[in-house]
Image (spheres, helix red, strand yellow):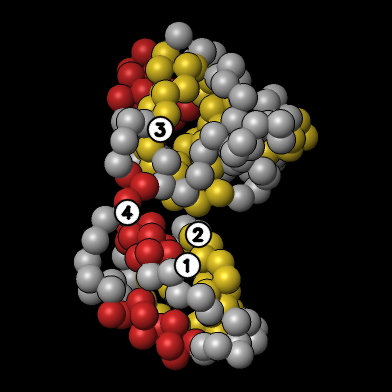
Amino acid sequence: MIEFTVLPYGDCAVLLELADPTEVLALRDGLLARREPAIRAVVPAARTVLVEFDPSRTDPERIAAIGIEMPDQTSDRLAGDPVCLPVRYAGADLAAVAEHCQLSVPELVELHAAAEYTVQFCGFSPGFGYLTGLDDRLRLPRLTTPRTEVPAGSVAIADEYTGVYPRSSPGGWRLLGRTSAVLFDLDRHPPAVLSPGTRVRFVPQ
């Protein structure tokens, strides 16, 4: 059984805070699989799942009961091949991160590219996925002073996450490299390459 705490979130939503963050996607998928007509949206985050509902048809207690009734499972979105993103590892922070982690640059690149990542949730900007699976040896805090502009396609790390900036924007993550892949395009369906549950691998170029 997935364990969570029910937190109020206005009149039309409830926030489910999980005891184990790795179960966020399983809870999201389980709620969607129930196809409850009263549920309007299910939005995963780092350690929570936001459930928006029709208050004329259900209530927070019923939403919580649905979650508790679900059997243990893994996310259905983890099946299939991962998205492979080519990366040129030459980011502005590559050498500094390697030094801080007491690694050579080739060792850092090998560690980052060896892992398979999963998009835990999306946010910050359209198409930006927060990817879990980063090696513990590469976990560093965000920059003290964010950059005013980070180039589109920048591959970066911050805390327990790695991610790719889908467009040029300010940002405080540590830059390891850059991909030529276009992660968000309004003329494409769907516009975003990455969504919660997508598996990702980085391929050094």
Q: Which mark is residue 15?
A: none
Give the quarter of the image for residue 65.
bottom left
Number of marks in picture? 4
On the image, numbered disc 3 is attached to which residue? 200
Residue at (22%, 66%) from the top-left corner? 72
Q: Amino acid at mark 1?
A: Val
On the image, numbered disc 1 is attached to which residue? 49
Label 3 vs 2, first from the N-terminus: 2
Please say whether residue 25 is visible from this viewpoint: yes
The image position of residue 18, as x and y in percent, is 38, 70
Q: Are marks 4 and 3 in contact (CB under 8 Å)?
A: no
On the image, numbered disc 4 is attached to which residue? 75
Q: Nearer the viewer, mark 4 or mark 3?
A: 4
Split into 4 quadrants, where in the image is the N terminus? Answer: bottom left
**Label 3, residues with CA under 10 Å away: few <14, some 14-19, many ≥20:** many
**Label 2, residues with CA under 10 Å away: few <14, some 14-19, many ≥20:** some
Foreground: 114 or 108? 114
Q: Amino acid at mark 2?
A: Ala
Q: Are marks 2 and 1 in contact (CB under 8 Å)?
A: yes
On the image, numbered disc 2 is attached to which residue? 45
Q: Which element type, helix, strand or loop, lies under badge 4?
A: loop
**Label 4, residues with CA under 10 Å away: few <14, some 14-19, many ≥20:** some
Q: Which element type, helix, strand or loop, lies under badge 2?
A: loop
